[in-house]
Image: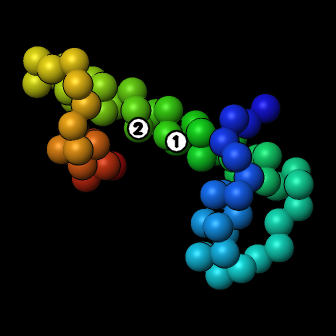
């Protein structure tokens, strides 16, 4: 089950063009967003570690998102 709240995810859909979304689609979307966020966090942590830091900085996230 997804951990992200529905409201922020629905706002993203609204910004994208306002489509109706079923309850099942909301769950699937939340799971996909969480999966992407987890992968991004893991890559950002690895980038910080590569730079001999334990703290993730914005430049770590930028570095991994630019390489995708």
State the image coordinates of residue 55 (x, y, percent, origin top left).
Answer: 23, 25
Asked if disc 1 and disc 2 are in contact, CB closer than 8 Å, the reply is yes
Q: Residues within 10 Å of mark 2 (few under 14, many from 20)?
A: some
User: Residue drawn 50% across and 32% down?
Assistant: 38
Which mark, residue 50?
none
Q: Which quadrant: the N terminus?
A: top right
Secondary structure at numbered mark 2? helix
Horizontal side of 41 relative to 46 (left or right) equals right
Q: Residue 10 versus residue 45: which sits nearer the camera? A: 10
Total residue callouts: 2
The image quadrant of residue 52 is: top left
State the image coordinates of residue 29 (x, y, percent, origin top left).
Answer: 71, 51
Q: How is the image coloured?
A: rainbow
User: Residue drawn 65% across and 81% down?
Assistant: 17
Residue furthest to the left in view is 51
Q: Badge 2 is on which residue?
A: 40
Q: Badge 1 is on which residue?
A: 36
Horizontal side of 36 relative to 57 (left or right) equals right
Q: Residues within 10 Å of mark 1 (few under 14, many from 20)?
A: few
């Amino acid at each position: 089950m997804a951990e992200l709240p529905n409201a922020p995810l629905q706002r993203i859909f609204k910004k994208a063009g306002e489509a109706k979304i079923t309850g099942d689609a909301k769950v699937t979307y939340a799971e996909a967003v969480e999966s992407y966020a987890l992968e991004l966090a893991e890559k950002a942590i690895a980038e910080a570690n590569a730079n001999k830091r334990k703290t993730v900085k914005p430049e770590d996230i930028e570095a991994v998102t630019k390489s995708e």
